[in-house]
Amino acid sequence: MFLGHYLDVTRHKTLVFWYSVKFCGYVLYRALVHDLSKYRDPEKSGFSLNRDRLKKIAYNDKQYATVREESLKEAISHHHKVNRHHPEYHKRGIRDMGLIDCTEMLLDWLATARASKFGDVFVSIDKGKERFDLPDEMATILKNTTKEAKNERTRQNVGRRNRG
């Protein structure tokens, strides 16, 4: 009597596992090829010549905007044209991005925030909300995902009901 149920659940779990492996495999592939364009010109020259300046300023402050306009315009334009994890790559911005694109974008923001002494990924998400017209729900999902990624205890509580 219960055998059919157990077989159905096991088949379902197997398919979820299979799609999870495929999804994670593609995310790992995207991590491997992430920002490869920065190894070639015009990005290589633009970013390497401005490396020291960029390390001393916070993302999206006035100095950052000046460096972007004066020294990095060509490099950044090229970068956005060839890297689909940037909303500028897509005709309709964030609305044309898939979950894997958004995942890579968030991981990019996390890594950038961590590498900068001025970095704060939550500020980056808020700036991204303004800059890319992120819907409120999307910004909330990005913030919740960041909290999960930073909280080791979350992994221990997988499958447990949130009572708080």
Image: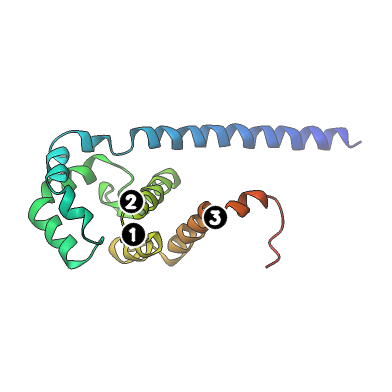
Q: Is residue 12 left or right of residue 149?
A: right
- Report the residue marked by disc 3: 148
Q: What x and y, as percent, mark residue 8?
A: 76, 35
Q: Which label sits on residue 119? A: 1
Q: How far is the residue under mark 3 from the one under mark 1?
A: 18 Å
Q: Is residue 98 left or right of residue 163?
A: left
The amino acid at mark 3 is Glu
Q: What x and y, as percent, mark residue 39?
A: 21, 34
The amino acid at mark 1 is Gly
User: Nearest the camera: 39 or 88?
Assistant: 39
Q: How far is the residue under mark 1 from the one under mark 2?
A: 7 Å
Q: How far is the residue under mark 3 from the one under mark 2?
A: 20 Å
Quadrant (top left/top right/bottom left/bottom right) for the C terminus: bottom right
> In the figure, residue 30 lies in which quadrant?
top left
Please report the residue visible at 69 percent of the width from the left and 36 percent of the height from the top: 13
In the rendered structure, which disc, 3 or 1, sits on the residue that comes first in sequence?
A: 1
Q: Which label sits on residue 130? A: none
Classify 10 Å Cα crowding around label 3: few (below 14), some (14-19), many (20 and above).
few
- Report the residue marked by disc 2: 115
The amino acid at mark 2 is Ala
Q: Are marks 1 and 2 in contact (CB under 8 Å)?
A: yes
Please report the residue visible at 12 percent of the width from the left and 40 percent of the height from the top: 45
